Amino acid sequence: MFAVHLMAFYFTKLKEDQIKKVDRFLYHMRLSDETLLDIMARFQAEMQKGLGKDTNPTASVKMLPTFVRAIPDGSENGEFLSLDLGGSKFRVLKVQVSEEGKRNVQMESQFYPTPNEIIRGNGTQLFEYVADCLADFMKTKGLKQKKFPLGLTFSFPCRQTKLEEGILLSWTKKFKARGVQNTDVVRSLANAMKKHKDIDVDILALVNDTVGTMMTCAYDDPYCEVGVIIGTGTNACYMEDMSNIDLVEGDEGRMCINTEWGAFGDDGALEDIRTEFDRELDLGSLNPGKQLFEKMISGLYLGELVRLILLKMAKAGLLFGGEKSSALHIKGKIETRHVAAMEKYKEGLANTREILTDLGLEPSEADCIAVQHVCTIVSFRSANLCAAALAAILTRLRENKKLARLRTTVGMDGTLYKIHPQYPKRLHKVVRKLVPNCDVRFLLSESGSTKGAAMVTAVASRVQAQRKQIDKVLALFQLTREQLEGVQDKMRVELDYGLKRDTHPLATVKMLPTYVRGMPDGTEKGKFLALDLGGTNFRVLLVKIRSGWRSVRIYNKIFAIPLEIMQGTGEELFDHIVQCIADFLDYMGLKGAQLPLGFTFSFPCRQASIDKGTLIEWTKGFKATDCEGEDVVDMLREAIKRRNEFDLDIVAVVNDTVGTMMTCGYEDPNCEVGLIAGTGSNMCYMEEMRNIELVEGDEGKMCINTEWGGFGDNGCIDDIRTQYDKEVDEGSLNPGKQRYEKMTSGMYLGEIVRQILIDLTKQGLLFRGQISERLRTRGIFETKFLSQIESDRLALLQVRRILQQLGLDSTCEDSIVVKEVCGAVSRRAAQLYGAGLAAIVEKRREDQGLEHLKITVGVDGTLYKLHPHFSRILQETVKELAPQCDVTFMLSEDGSGKGAALITAVAKRLQQARKEN
Ligand code: BG6
Ligand code: BG6
Ligand code: GLC
Ligand code: GLC
């Protein structure tokens, strides 16, 4: 009994002495809580530095955006291939993610060796080797018939600008293949795979192992938002708020950041805690000066640190009676698995004796105890350091979420963490001590990081498939040069049809003579009233023209025309107009004045003289009854009579295109075309009288209002009309009519966009597949919204805000798609305008027998004025399709009211002259 006690006492004393000795020797490796809190604070600062745009270039902790934006939601499915390269083992896998929404993943895998001559040889050979292994795997598993999406777990620091890219920043751990740094490893691997003609894979994602681990664990636990590897190397990733990631556009949601914390301290930030052993180890490594934090922590280095310490202690006579074996001098002789074995709870001492003996040493009982304690100190320091950095991440997460307490899960992997008997316990304990306000669950990734990589790939492959569907829809709006030339040619044919007596009655482009025969000559003068009806706004104007150029003063007032009046009876409409005139005269103090009036009436009218216009049919948003087939000038006169308050001399009725041409022609006599790209779409131009068969006389020119909006009403451009155009047509006030207008003008572009969005939503490609009430509402996308959405200066978030204003609750991805849809629709519109205009200017050039035509086009309309790209694309298209015409575009600043007044002035002068005669 006594002997047993004595033995126990002796042993305890021996142990105490040895521990004290080692503690004294390695006091620098034992980190106090205070130091850990300090390291934690330093790492917090490093993260901030890495995330900042300006500070990132010099930051040692790179905080790399991974383009992984969400954790798996369980809807992932399909079959994927996966490569796992960079940890202690290289694996190729096939992952099958459940189809039926059950969270069920099946994996088949095969390990392949990674010989040093491959991982430290030539880069091309490395990728060829990886491709060979993949081909071998597919062959043995019988996977060669099918195309597979592939996710690559590549456990090295890579800069990404998208998921399927990874520019290697530097090799770490055991790898050092030449010619790979600063190149895209996805592309290199894809190239290497081209040699295998019999396999077909599509690399959709590159993920770091930390990211794969986080995703693997998140598949089972949706709280998981951090991934940590403590294996050959060490690293962590976590979900960061997009608004904190300067390097990636967008502020919405979160993105996973690969911290690459292994490089913490590479700028000297940890010099105070690094020991002589750390420095010696670093000098002997493949990447001296790099990954200094990792070298104090991870599996590749722990054994070596122990070896360096034992050697030094032996040299100092503190171990093995001062004896050193030759094996103890050899780099790498002690590995992490040895450290783990020596620290085992029960067998630890025996293991230690065995390991030391294997190293050719003759350890005493005391030596074994001391060596075991060395291992403990080294691995404990490792766990402490990891805990400090992890605590910094957890704190950041908690602060991002503005929570007093954070409940979260950390996905864990890596051999050191998995095989070391004490490591997990110690790490967890220290983390909990450092961040008492976080409830952390540590979840071991049982199936490695590839399951997670497959999840990322699954999402990417879904996105890719969706992208294809979206592209297919957008492609319908992309017109080839030949198609545009086709439009131009057909337009040209229709123009001629409309001018010819025989074909005119059936022509869809009506080519209406306007009885406007010349441009203003500058002698016009007087005070005129003008009405401007049919665009976005209804205006009443007073135009004062003084003789002498450019001396025009305009006073005007905008009046609303309520929908029920636009679509009520003709009498109501014209009574309302007269009411507005009365208000205006009142407002201007002109009550009772009898002024000549020019009426801009932006609808197709058949004219027999300048002051007569029979409405052929309503277009755009008007549908008042009893007007079609009536002379609108008469209707206005009757309404004035009905009111019986004032009299007006209605001298001219003009289309807005004509008014616009005149407005611009007043300043540039070369302006012989008027173009409207607004609510509606139309064009007028000066035609030779001899070509106008409907009007007597061959002398001089007359303006023709083409009413080109009706182009295509005979089906001649049905080949380029899409299902969406047809839907918009069917839902309009005038189905089957104005087909060209419905593909080009402001009133309809938004509707086309809306129809596309509805279809994409039905296909589950937008708005989470939910068609909201708002999206069902006709007319929500006014031209001004399209113009805003397409503005280049707008960040995604702003696009999203506009959509939200419209009542469309969109994600960032949705916003991108909506913007693309708007772009495709407006681009086609501008090109179609270009093709139409090219037909006219070419006709004018040929009619005049000119090699080159120089001509000015007066333009107006909200689409042209507000849209950020419309005018440019229109101009480019004209240039391309009519290269022999030099077309100048002149924006009508004053609207068409001024032109209408000028026409009135000319007509008045002629009227006067006739009377005098
Ligand atoms: C494995 C993962 O489980 O752990 C790898 O699948 C990862 O992606 C590895 O790199 C890390 O641990 P170690 O110890 O193999 O480097
Ligand atoms: C205005 C003209 O500036 O533009 C109107 O004065 C014309 O006559 C209008 O109808 C066309 O553009 P929108 O976009 O208002 O239809
Ligand atoms: C190294 C790599 C890093 C990886 C880690 C764990 O630190 O640089 O990308 O995540 O090892 O494998
Ligand atoms: C519609 C009208 C037309 C007008 C154009 C632009 O196409 O029919 O007359 O010029 O819109 O406002």
Image (spheres, rainbow, N blue to C red):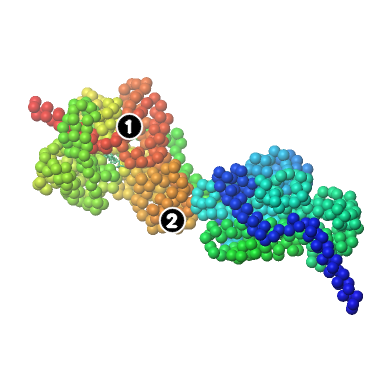
> Is 710 rendered above or below residue 548?
below
Could you tell me residue 213's position as x and y percent? 65, 57
Q: Is residue 899 visible?
A: yes
In x, y percent, where is residue 728? 36, 48
**Residue 637 visible at all:** no
Does 686 sit above or below residue 325? above
The residue type indicated by label 1 comes to Met
Side of 800 where 119 appears, left or right: right
Residue drawn at x 89%, y 59% is: 363
Q: Which residue is mark 1?
A: 890
Instruction: Report crowding for label 1: few under 14, some 14 to 19, many 20 or more residues within 10 A (C-alpha).
Output: many
Q: Check contact, mark 1 vs mark 2: CB within 8 A.
A: no
Q: Quadrant of the C terminus?
A: top left
Residue depicted at 49% across the width and 46% down the height: 472
Number of marks in picture:
2
Picture disc at residue 499: none
Residue 551 in which image quadrant: top left
Q: Which residue is mark 2?
A: 809
The residue at 45%/54% (across/down) is 810
Determine if the C-beta at disc 2 is less than 8 A from ligand 2.
Answer: no
Secondary structure type for disc 1 = strand
Residue 92 image position (x, y, % from top left): 70, 52
CA–CA distance in space, label 1 to label 2: 39 Å
Observer-nearest of 576 and 653: 576
